[in-house]
Image (spheres, coloured by chain):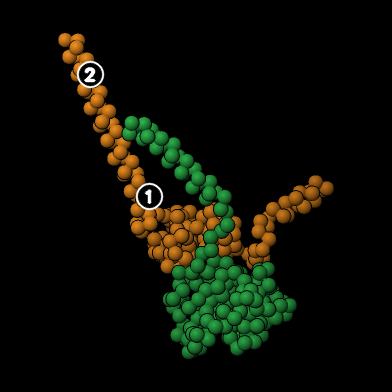
Chain colours: A green, B orange
Amino acid sequence: MKSRWLLWLPLALFAGLAVFFIGGLQNDAPRVVTSALVGKPLPAFNLPAGASDRPALDSREYTKGKPRLLNIFASWCVPCAAEAPQLMALADAGVPVDGIAIRDARADVDDFLARHGNPYAHIGLDARSQVQIALGSSGVPETFLVDGEGRILHQHIGDIRAEDVPGLIAKWKAAQ
Amino acid sequence: MLSAALMLVISAPASFPALAQTALPPAPYANRQLDDPAQEKKARDLMHSIRCLTCQSQSVADSEASMAGDLRSEIRERIAKGEEPEHIRSWLIERYGDWISYEPTAEPIMWPLWGVPLLLLGVGGLLVAGRMKRRGAATDGKKGKQI
């Protein structure tokens, strides 16, 4: 009697796995890859200037005692244009924002900033994504909150929406 | 002439697979092999087991995404400088977590992966042992009858 039930076990296993695999195939949303460096020190970098009217960006900027936002963007990135007004609002609220332009050229960054506004205090040019990779960032745009001692406190993945701004300001204030 | 122009029109969109990507040329070693074949093999083996973060079910070796190209160049240049592939892998895992590597680790979440084959082998062994015993008993019985 017992072995008769056992006969159905392979079929049940098959059905279970089929449900699991078909479920996995249906779910084609890319996984959000967060940086494993949140809570850890910002890697050291020294980038050339990414725009003609802003200074270059050195990681030592983040050990001067004041928390700052580090925005990963690119002139060729559409959501970056969409988040520009929110970055402006953050800068207007007194939050220092720096930018790293990924795989970009200075003339294109200048053009992008002329069109969408320039919230950045410093802009670095990461023409080969090397600093982006060192940061554990997997796309544009992304924004890191770094405290005054150079520790990464928070990573915002994707464009900053209007509703994200108050939360980011609060996090920045809490990091003071 | 006309057909050449037509070809150009047809092939133009195909040469820019992802529209949102950058116009900058690829990094120096994104699509260029290292001169030393042994080093190139090391780099290639590693690239095939590192996930592309833009096209997540591809490895950086297979992906056309610009970030994958930058990672290929980074990997090749580091190997050319004498860095060990496993060191580069752990450097990447430090930044992106285990998910960037296709190589299974010994973390507890992977234990079923290592354990299940052993378990199935054990079950198979028991089944075979049981069957052989029964068959042995059956043939013994037959022999007994024949004699």
Disc sitting over residue B113 in the figure: 1
Look at the image and tell me in which quarter the N terminus of chain A lies.
top left
Is B60 situated above or below B138? below
Mark 1: which secondary structure? helix
Question: Residue B128: horizontal and vertical position, in percent?
Answer: 28, 31
Mark 2: which secondary structure? helix
Task: Say which of A84 and B13 sits in front.
Answer: A84
Determine crowd level at label 1: few under 14, some 14-19, many 20+ residues with C-alpha closer than 10 A.
Answer: few
Amino acid at the residue labelled 2: Thr
Disc sitting over residue B4 in the figure: none
Q: Earlier in the sequence, mark 1 or mark 2?
A: 1
Q: Residue at x 79, y 49 (%)?
A: B6
Residue A59 seen from this side:
no
- Tell whether B103 sits left or right of B15: left
Question: Residue A22: horizontal and vertical position, in percent?
Answer: 53, 46
Amino acid at the residue labelled 1: Leu
Residue position for label 2 = B139
Q: Residue at x 23, y 18 (%)?
A: B139
